[in-house]
Amino acid sequence: MTAEPISSTPEVTAKVVDGALRAIARFGLTKLTVDDVAREAGISRATLYRYFPGRGAVLAAVVQAETERLQRGLDEALGEVATLAEALAAVGGFGARAFTGHEALQHLLATEPGTVLPHLCFAGADSLLGVAAARIAPHLCRFMGPLEARRTGEWLARIVLSYGLAPPPGSAESAVVGVVREFVIPAAEERSDQTGG
């Protein structure tokens, strides 16, 4: 994913990203072609290549768009919360829905786990969890200090990742929110009280 997209219009980029996600959800990543993406996007191959010099640029655009979409979703989920408990439950619920409801990701986990698991386990997970904690922490800083907010954000991301990779029977969202309410909220509130956050 080293090739960068050429300057594109937001409309074309959105079509290509949506088409790529649909194509990945149908065909996987290993056999994904630019033709698949163009077909799913409803544009010609020539149009796609005019803005994206190849598969790597398309995938880079998908990663960027999905990162922005997740940030908007997180901002929205936490926009109206008034307490630390509400914020923690909102993060957990949003994370579980985003992970388990992502068709392309779920298809890859089921059919090509080797393409995504290196990014979700061990060193790959450390990087992902660091990014997630950095995205969650600013929302939690209203209720606790920055260090505690980052650590709590990482706890939440770890719980979502664990339940996302090994979903329990029933709803992953219910399971994640249950764990957050039973364990994370009391620990975070106690820690916040101790540190005066």
Image (cartoon, rainbow, N blue to C red):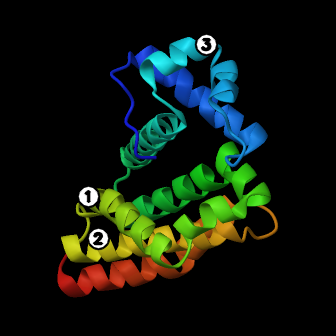
Question: Amino acid type of disc 3?
Answer: Ile
Nearest to N terminus: mark 1 or mark 3:
3
Nearest to N terminus: mark 2 or mark 3:
3
Indicate which label's residue lies in the foreground, 1 or 3.
3
What residue is shown with label 1?
138
- Taking the spot 35% from the left edge, 78% from the top edge, the residue there is 189
- Res. 175 image quadrant: bottom right
Q: Quadrant of the C terminus?
A: bottom left
Mark linked to residue 149: 2
Indicate which label's residue lies in the foreground, 2 or 3.
3
Work out whether 66 lies above or below 113: above
Question: Amino acid type of disc 1?
Answer: Pro
Q: Nearer the viewer, residue 155 or 190?
A: 155
- Res. 39 image quadrant: top right
- Taking the spot 30% from the left edge, 71% from the top edge, the residue there is 150
Image spot of residue 46 (x, y percent)? 55, 13
Q: Nearer the viewer, residue 67 or 13?
A: 13
* Crowding at mark 2 (Cα within 10 Å: few <14, some 14-19, many 20+): many
Q: Name the element at disc 3.
A: loop
Q: Name the element at disc 1.
A: helix
Distance of mark 2 from mark 3, alpha carbons?
44 Å
Image spot of residue 43 (x, y percent)? 61, 12
